[in-house]
Image (cartoon, rainbow, N blue to C red):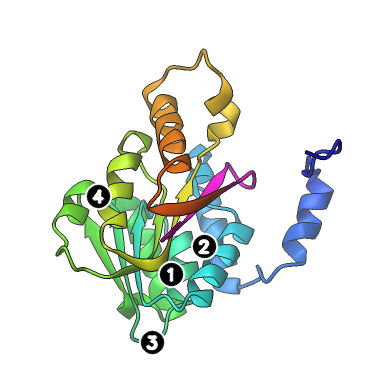
Amino acid sequence: MADRAKYLNLTPKLYAYLVAHGHNDDPIRAELAEETGKLGMISMMQIAPEQGSMMALLARAIGARSVVEVGTFTGYSSLCVAGALPSDGRMLCCDVSEQWTSIAMKYWKRAGVADRITLKIAPAIETLRALAPDYPIDFAFIDADKTSYRAYYEEILKRMRRDGLILIDNVLWNGEVVNESNLTEDTVAIRALNDFVATDTRVEAVMLGTFDGLTIVRKR
């Protein structure tokens, strides 16, 4: 490795510069972010604008037509990715909260992507296991209860087409993955998944130190 670490500690000013120099200025996305921010601390569950832009870019780059999202919250990530799909594309969103997803549905409709999205309010593992074995998945985003990450990963991967992508959020868990004294269920589950993906020969993967840690997996 080079002597100089290849990462930056972003200051608020530098982060604002970063956001301003990407295509992150969609007005409907901005309104959704503002409404979600008014919910208080739980608004931290919403992804960052540049992450949404990156996800949309990746989905469009691989020509994704069928997407699965596990953990929708108020809909920012699904709004971004659904907008990158062709008009006949489809996105399955899995969540357990009618309260938060009711906000999502409002913005999907405003953005003209509601007809591409099917929302299932149920435990996501039940929704995924109920999919046909040949249900095609091109692109997936996992951002829900951490103890079930491995189960979500397996159900998605077995249905994913070759060269499809899975994005897994929160894989650094605010740095707690390297805190050996942290043995909470969520932390242990994320650590275990990270270790597993790093040796999974069915895929190639890269972990990025952006956001709260994001792993991008490509099915071989």
Viewer-nearest of discs 4 and 2: 4
At label 1, counting other C-alpha atoms closer than 10 Å, the crowd grade (few under 14, some 14-19, many 20 or more) is many
- Find disc 2 in the rendering and name its residue: 32
Query: CB atoms at circles 3 and 2 under 8 Å apart?
Result: no
Confirm whether the magenta stretch covers residue 214: yes
The quarter of the displayed image where residue 183 is located: top left
Above or below, 200 relative to 118: above
Does residue 142 lie above or below 118 as drawn? above
Q: Nearer the viewer, residue 128 or 82?
A: 128
Q: Which mark is residue 107?
A: 1
Q: Is residue 22 left or right of residue 58?
A: right
* Label 4 environment density (alpha carbons within 10 Å; few <14, some 14–19, many ≥20): many
Q: Secondary structure at mark 1?
A: helix
Task: Give me the residue at 19% from left, 68% from top.
Answer: 134
Say which residue label 3 marks: 87
Residues at marks 2 and 1 touching, judged by CB atoms closer than 8 Å: yes
- Place of residue 49 in the rendered image (x, y in percent of width and height, measured from the top left): 61, 59
Q: Which residues fall within the magenta stretch? A: 207-220
Q: Residue at x 57, y 43 (%)?
A: 213
**Callout 2: few (<14), some (14-19), or many (20+) C-alpha neighbours within 10 Å?**
some
User: Decide: marks 1, 3 in contact (CB < 8 A)?
Assistant: no
